[in-house]
Image (spheres, rainbow, N blue to C red):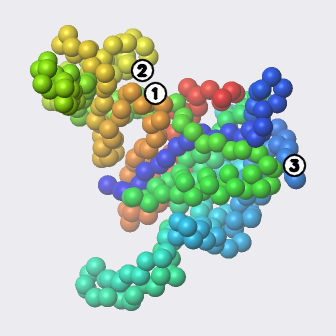
Amino acid sequence: MNNLSLTACSIWIREKNPGKNNTVNIVNLNKKIKGEKKEYDDFFELLKDFCQKYSRKFVLNDSEQKMFKVETENINIEENEKFRYTYIDINSGGYGIEANIVNTKTNKILYTRKKEHAETIHFRVFFAVPKDDDTCKGIIIFQNIGQYGIKTITTDYFKKFINEELNLYTTTGNICPQVFVKKLLDNDGLMKIIYTRNNVSNDKADTETMGYGKEERIIAGFSNVKKWREMISGYFNGTNRVYEFEDIDYSGVKFVTSIYGRTRTININNINNLSIIEGIPDEVTNSFGDIDDQKLKEHFIKVTKEYLEHMVYNKI
């Protein structure tokens, strides 16, 4: 099993200050994007300029002790019937810590990495914009390797670039978490459900001191997984409006699931802030464990189609 995953998010651009009727003007990503200093034909022309600027050399972020560099200077825009997209390479890594580099096979120290040395990792990033005339929201998919990823550093530099070049504000956010939850449930990886509530004590002495505690009811070892999947789905589509189990009302529900060997705990009460992190299937790597770029790109396209089918991208 590989150690690859993806993080998906939405992106939109808007003016900083409200206009008439106190409304904020959201930028159409398929039309001209105008700023105070520059003008671009569309989102991908803007992205090209960003890639060229950050492909010249590594940029150092001393506060985070990280390096960043776009390796794709000239991006290639492709399209299908639903959206346009591009696929870029980024190198990033950390520095600032002195460490010994050890050969795991011989157990010998090869050399000492100095504080000014950086370990950089190659990542892939996928950008997609729906082809509708009134599209104001796109999708970015970031490849992760184990615990390492580049979502934060990439979006930080992209926001900085748009602010400096256009004086516009960029936001990244969630994309249709209900689709992600459905994918988790359909994967037959449901492990357990956790119902929670605040339990007020009936003892007067308790209420005068602590007063309450948190009660958890954990359901596992399902004999009818389909029934439980339907119950969880009902919490999202409005069919089940009360978290109830065995005639007891609960204030919160979480469920634990596994997809591609990765365990996730999903808090239904906080679903709109859910980070979309999916495992990447082993099929994108070859027999040596190396990534097949074409297969990875095809997987990103498949994931984008799944989310765009349910995503509202012509308004915020």
Q: Taking 243 as reference, is 312 above or below it?
A: below
In front of the other: 41 or 247 = 247
Q: Do the numbered discs 2 and 1 sit on residues whose CB atoms are within 8 Å?
A: yes
**Residue picked out by circle 1:** 178
Closer to us: 263 or 97: 97
Which mark is on residue 23?
none
Instruction: Say what secondary structure mark 2 lies in.
Output: helix
Query: What is the distance, in whole Å, between disc 3 and disc 1 at their CAs?
Result: 38 Å
Tell which circle, 3 or 1, labels the residue nearer the N-terminal end.
3
Secondary structure of residue under mark 1 = helix
Query: Residue 119, relative to residue 133: is it above or below?
Result: below
Q: Which of marks 3 and 2 is in front?
A: 3
Name the amino acid, label 1. Gln
User: Within 10 angstroms of label 1, few (less than 14), some, or many (20 or more) residues?
Assistant: some
Kindly identify which residue carries mark 3. 36
Residue 195: tell me if it is visible.
no
Q: Please name the residue that numbered disc 2 is placed on.
A: 236
How far apart in space, not on screen, are marks 3 and 2 (Cα)? 42 Å
| Type of amino acid at the residue the image marks with label 2 | Phe
Please state which of residues 142 and 302 is positioned toward the viewer in this rendering: 142
Query: Which residue corresponds to the image point at 62% horizontal and 26% vertical from the top-left?
Result: 312
Q: Dot 2: within a 10 Å radius of its alpha carbon, few (fewer than 14), some, or many (20 or more) residues?
A: some
Please name the residue shown 53% across and 65% down the image.
64
Mark 3 crowd level (few <14, some 14–19, many ≥20, 10 Å Cα): few
- How far apart, in angstroms, are the residues tagged by discs 2 and 1? 7 Å
